[in-house]
Image (spheres, rainbow, N blue to C red):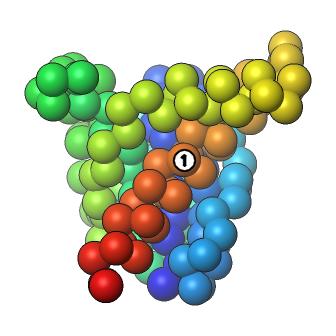
Amino acid sequence: MILFGVDFGDTRTGWAVCDKTELIASPAGVLTEKNFLRCAEKTAEAARNANAEEIVVGHPLNMNGTAGPRAEKCAAFAGKLRELSGLPVVLWDERCTTVSAHQILNTTNTRGKKRKDVVDAVAAVLILESYMNFRKNQTK
């Protein structure tokens, strides 16, 4: 199944997509859009263009598992994506993915503007990989 991962942000939203076998998640781009509705519309369109069958949106829960204002905004975004795309949308715990994305970019010595341009797509890949691993383990 082709899955489309999303790391939603107020300014930049990272996208990732996996292959049909759910083996490899790859960055699919970063959208710079501050308008909530336009961001949802463009993300739904990107998911359709990728032939996605399901969308996975990062859900930034607090470290104690509660949902703060950011998690609520991501849940609202997921709801809007579901409405606009007609696809199933899953909220997926994304605690620490941005930190992990920065660590990966440190390892590859990606700095400055280039880092800013890709960090959200790397975070989307990490969200999608986590969800893919969950699905793989559920089928066993």
Query: Which residue is painted at 44% across and 55% down in the image?
Result: 130
Asked if one can make out residue 34 in the rendered structure from this viewpoint, the answer is: no
Residue farthest toward the top in the current orientation of the protein: 112
Q: Quadrant of residue 136?
A: bottom left
Q: Nearer the viewer, residue 56 or 77?
A: 56
Residue farthest toward the front in the current orientation of the protein: 140
In the image, is residue 97 above or below residue 52? above
Q: Quadrant of residue 102?
A: top right
Residue 33, image x and y in percent?
A: 58, 32
Residue 70, image x and y in percent?
A: 29, 24
How many residues crowd mark 1 within 10 Å: few (<14), some (14–19), many (20+)?
A: many
Asked if one can make out residue 70 in the rendered structure from this viewpoint, the answer is: yes
Q: Quadrant of residue 109?
A: top right
In the image, is residue 39 above or below residue 20? above
Q: Type of residue at label 1?
A: Leu
Classify residue 43 as left or right of residue 93: right
Quadrant position of the C terminus in the picture: bottom left
Residue that carries the numbered disc 1 in the rendered image: 126
Question: How many marks are shown on the rendered structure?
Answer: 1
Classify residue 73 as left or right of residue 26: left
Q: Nearer the viewer, residue 77 or 138?
A: 138
Classify residue 140 as left or right of residue 65: right
Tag 1's secondary structure?
Answer: helix
Residue 100, image x and y in percent?
A: 56, 30
Query: Which residue is painted at 31% across and 84% down in the image?
Result: 139
Classify residue 100 as left or right of residue 86: right
Residue 124, image x and y in percent?
A: 55, 46
Query: Which residue is painted at 15% across and 23% down in the image?
Result: 64
